Image: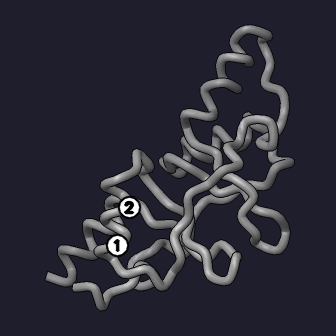
Amino acid sequence: MRDGTIADFMRRDFLSVTPATPMREAVARLVETQSSVAPVVDDEGHLLGILSQKDCFAAALNSAYYQRWSDSVARYMSENVEVMDKALDIVSAAERFQAMPYRAFPVLSEGILVGMLSRSDLLKAFLDLG
């Protein structure tokens, strides 16, 4: 089973945002796509951070206190991001999921964001591989 890599099971179609994306728009897109996280990228696809639903609560509470949404993703995103390389085998990826609290990991190839891997994506890989 170690032969399968996460590149075979990662999602290539996923929500991403930029640091300049207004927070209200980013929150709406997370909700609309039922995503728990959105990678934050620059124009070349380099990963700059990640915006989680948890990160969004600070902006939502701020909007409740001041009666308006303000700021951009840059203010609320997490910059220290755990990532996986697309060549990582699925067993090693499962061990990372088990050891960390994250629901999804950005997947990189040569420093460029190429996919997202969620817990359910990886569990499906184990089922598919038998």
Q: Residue at x 27, y 85 (%)?
A: 2
Nearest the eye: 128 or 84: 84
What secondary structure is found at the residue carrying circle 1? helix
Residue at figure coordinates x 60%, y 75% from the top left: 108
Residue 96: which disc?
2
Q: Residue at x 77, y 12 (%)?
A: 67
State the residue in front, 78 or 14: 78
Q: Is residue 62 above or below residue 11?
A: above
**2 above or below 97?**
below
- How far is disc 1 from disc 2 in space, using C-alphas? 6 Å
Q: Which mark is residue 92?
A: 1
Categorize mark 2 by other alpha carbons within 10 Å: few (<14), some (14-19), many (20+).
some
Please report the residue visible at 80 percent of the width from the left and 18 percent of the height from the top.
68
Q: Quadrant of residue 92?
A: bottom left
Comparing 15 with 5, the one in front is 5
Which quarter shows the N terminus?
bottom left
Give the amino acid type for the residue marked by disc 1 in the picture.
Answer: Ser
